Image (tube, rainbow, N blue to C red):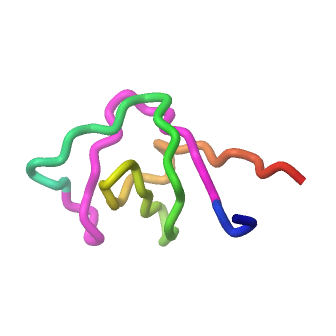
Amino acid sequence: REALREAVVVSANARPTDERGIVVPAGVALPEGARVEIVATRSSWTRVRFGAADVWLSSSALRELARPD
């Protein structure tokens, strides 16, 4: 899993959005401190996987974790 990239949610109101940046109507905010897998990045948005959810978050709501050598 050398390609695995993970981050921690650092915002109390990390609202999931779709690929256009529009808040998902039934989406629940990811909890602060949640560990997520980074799937993709685009501009100021990051696509993450949290459990079964695969959503976009503002990149400023995340801090990428350092990978061990």
| Vertical arrangement, residue 20 with respect to residue 57, above or below | below
In the displayed structure, does residue 44 sit left or right of residue 27? right
Which quadrant holds residue 2? bottom right
Instruction: Pick whichever, 68 or 64, lies toward us.
Output: 68
Would residue 14 be counted in the magenta stretch? Answer: yes
Q: In the rendering, at what x and y percent does residue 13 appear?
A: 32, 33
In the displayed structure, does residue 47 sit left or right of residue 25? right
Q: Residue at x 27, y 38 (%)?
A: 29
Q: Quadrant of the C terminus?
A: bottom right
Instruction: Pick whichever, 3 or 48, lies toward us.
Output: 3
What segment carries the magenta color? 5-22
What is the total number of numbered labels drawn onto the structure image?
Answer: 0
Q: In the rendering, at what x and y percent does residue 35 appear?
A: 52, 40
Which quadrant holds residue 15? top left
Instruction: Pick whichever, 39 or 18, lies toward us.
Output: 39
In the displayed structure, does residue 1 sit left or right of residue 8? right
> In the orientation shown, which residue stands out farthest toward the front?
1
Would residue 59 be counted in the magenta stretch? Answer: no
Q: Residue at x 25, y 65 (%)?
A: 18
Q: Residue at x 21, y 40 (%)?
A: 28
Q: In the rendering, at what x and y percent does residue 37 appear?
A: 52, 55
Q: Give the main secondary structure, helix, strand or loop, of the magenta stretch.
A: loop
